[in-house]
Amino acid sequence: MNKISRRLYSIPYFLWIVLFVVLPVLLVAYYSFFDVSGNFTFDNYRRFLTPVYLKMTVSSFWYAFLVTFFCLAVAYPTAYLLTYTKHKQLWLLLIILPTWINLLLKTYAFIGLFGAYGPVNEFFGFIGIGAQNLLFTDFSYVFVTTYIFIPFMIMPIFNSLEEMNISLIRASRDLGASSTQTFKRVILPLTMDGVKAGCQAVFIPALSLFMITRLISGNRVVTLGTAIEQHFLVTQDWGMGSTIAVVLIIAMGIIMYATGERKQKGRGK
């Protein structure tokens, strides 16, 4: 009865995976072999290997790397400080709350903040710097994207810090290790799983962003997500859009697999 009940309970899960994960991916892969006229072709993949799309791919990975780097630079010290605060749950709630707000609303809020007559430029004028062109720049895209993804970096790092055995830190101090040595040799290695999980949670979705590139950077930043949107909604070239999506899915899978392999090797040792 237990085995039968487990199989019955697992049916909705497998149906969900098949209907909303496997079939959509297969459908995208299917459309990638057709041109605008509906003819079967491999030209979409040949076009992707041209300098235009290769440059776009490099740009997507570069901006995703920048966003992940800045998220990590802010999230790790924040998560570390949270472990020593008295009201951890309250601070965590304040960090998570922005994720409950619609992404479009947050994007439009930054348009108002960074606008020519927004509060940021008013502050710059007050201190004598003068109005700056903050919107439609690389800076605005990286800043807004980093702000949006920071909670997804903080949470796994915070969890790994919370699960860490404090006695190991005390032991390193008793053995004469400095604060820097303790961090490099004890704290950082023990929290690497959280760092990797946070980097995955930020880097992978940052590769496929398209709405922020249009509203915040004014298409100054062009990513693979932007190209997919353009091909599906503007040029109506579903085949090329599907091809880019397939390449993006493969890239995400490679990143997740590589990270998973490193974890397994570390545990095996």
Image (tube, rainbow, N blue to C red):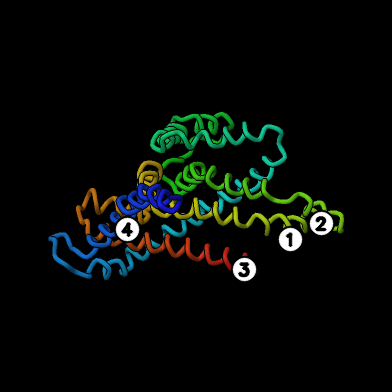
Using the numbered discs, state the Cα–Cα distance from disc 3 to disc 4 in whole angstroms: 34 Å
The mark nearer the N terminus, 1 or 4, is 1
Q: Which residue is mark 2?
A: 172
Q: Look at label 2 and name its amino acid.
A: Ser
Measuring from the top left, give residue 28's x and y in whole percent.
27, 58
Q: Is residue 225 above or below residue 151?
A: below
Q: Which residue is mark 4?
A: 245
The mark nearer the N terminus, 1 or 3, is 1
Q: Does residue 116 show up?
A: no
Q: Does residue 161 show up?
A: yes
Using the numbered discs, state the Cα–Cα distance from disc 2 to disc 1 in whole angstroms: 9 Å
User: Between residues 112 and 181, which one lies in front from this camera angle?
Assistant: 181
- Tell whether 88 sits left or right of 259: right
Mark 1: few/some/many CA within 10 Å (<14, 14-19, 20+): few
Q: Look at label 4 and name its amino acid.
A: Ala
Q: Which of labels 3 and 2 is toward the front?
A: 3
Mark 2: few/some/many CA within 10 Å (<14, 14-19, 20+): some
The mark nearer the N terminus, 3 or 4, is 4
The mark nearer the N terminus, 2 or 1, is 2
Using the numbered discs, state the Cα–Cα distance from disc 3 to disc 2 in whole angstroms: 24 Å
Q: Which residue is mark 1?
A: 185
Q: Which residue is mark 3?
A: 268
> Tag 3, which secondary structure?
helix
> Tag 4, which secondary structure?
helix
